Amino acid sequence: MEKAILVGLDCHQNDDFNVSMKELARLAEACDIEVVQVTTQKANEPTANYYIGQGKVESLKQDIQTLDANLVIFDDELSPSHIRNLERVLETKIIDRTVLILDIFARRAKTKEAMLQVELAQSMYLLPRVIGMYRSLSRQKSGTGSKGPGEQQLEIDRRILRDRIAKLKSELRDVVEVRRTQRKKRKQADVKTVAIAGYTNSGKSTLMNALLEHSSKKADKYMFEKNMLFATLETQTREITLANNHHFLLTDTVGFISKLPHHLIEAFKSTLEEIKESHLILHVIDAANPNYTNQLEVAESVLKEIGVEDIPIIHVYNKIDNCEKLPIDDYPYSIHVSALNDLNIDQLLELIDQLLHKDRHVVRMLIPFDQGQLFNYLKKHTHIQETIFSNEGIRLLVELDDLLLNKYAIYVQ
Ligand SMILES: Nc1nc2c(ncn2[C@@H]2O[C@H](COP(=O)(O)OP(=O)(O)OP(=O)(O)O)[C@@H](O)[C@H]2O)c(=O)[nH]1
Ligand SMILES: [Mg+2]
């Protein structure tokens, strides 16, 4: 087991700093790393050489020996030269928050798509840092008499990594194409889709399971939920059928976190596209977390980066069973629920149904008998409340959205 010292530089002197350090400890825990000490320093800005001050480096060196640590983890993304300088002085492995997050993603990735995405993000992170890595490798080799690494070797390593990145990108493109085709089919079939998004550990998968419990058609497989960061990596989609026969596809997605590495968002674009392509987003918020407003802002900024401006969002304040005070907000659509205790789930489903069918009109239609195909289409894609076979044709009481209403206006009575 690795034993780590966590290091944070407090540049703004606000509450977020402590929250961020606690989160870093949880990220380490998710990687099976034992945290033996947390070291912080207040400063206006990082130093050019070591990120932290010279004096702090000295005391860190002492602590590493005393505590027998073999890893130092910084809360912010370090530059290649910071890593190089720190490794040289501290003679131990130096990583940052980004590496931890990438590591967790690598451990959790199961599908081919997720594995390609994670490796791509890791390789892109590594590319400018190859030199640091090479130095630390050469340190291990010193004394064996082997030739030191020259510039030439470094160039070869970089080229190998660049080739690998190109290959990963092209493989990902193929996988993404499959996903796009699936989505296109859904769109053609006019199936409504809802995506669940939000901060990691907010209860997205638990909410998905609660909604599945309320579906009149039972799901055969439920989501994996657990009190750990990034329990869900793979996007999963299930169908929910309501009592009124309306149905929609619900997708659980990967959680967000503050300082989410940019490479990761880049690499996971295809997964995040599921959110972008949906008709409605459920933004799940862990209202029992004292830091929830912050998490909410982080999630909103990621959503903004994905580009979801035109999609309606329901703010789902979860874990209200565990809240001292109910959150107040001024979003157009929001609801308080407990996914774990099945509180207000029916109300949420009602709201989802309303928003998905905002433009729905209940009308009477008379379909001539020679338009059997249209009747079949309506049976498949709309909710028919009443069917009467009369002498003139088929009389329907049916729900139509704006599009269908315009298209088949001549049959509406
Ligand atoms: N008290 C309480 N706990 C909840 C509720 N909903 C979820 N949890 C707990 O919160 C933890 C995280 O739940 P998940 O559903 O895995 O969260 P997630 O958002 O899917 O997390 P990631 O997939 O890791 O991003 C679990 O331990 C759940 O049991 C709730 O309504 N009340
Ligand atoms: Mg999950």
Image (tube, rainbow, N blue to C red):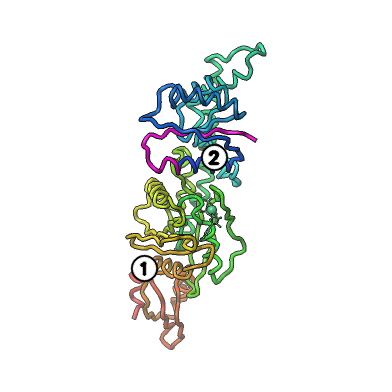
Q: Which residue is mark 2?
A: 118
Name which quarter of the figure residue 333 lies in.
bottom left
| Magenta part of the chain | 1-19
Which one is in front, 238 or 286? 286
Residue plotted at (44% across, 67% down): 348
The amino acid type found where label 2 is placed reads Val
Q: Relative to 307, is 189 above or below?
A: below
**Element type where label 1 sits in the image:** loop
Q: Relative to 129, is 244 above or below?
A: below
The x, y position of residue 76, in whole percent, is 45, 34
Which one is in front, 299 or 312? 299
The amino acid type found where label 1 is placed reads Lys
Tell me the quadrant of the picture where the N terminus can be found. Answer: top right
Q: Relative to 1, is 201 above or below?
A: below
Q: Which residue is mark 1?
A: 358
Q: Is residue 184 magenta?
A: no
Name which quarter of the figure residue 3 lies in.
top right
Residue plotted at (41% across, 64% down): 335
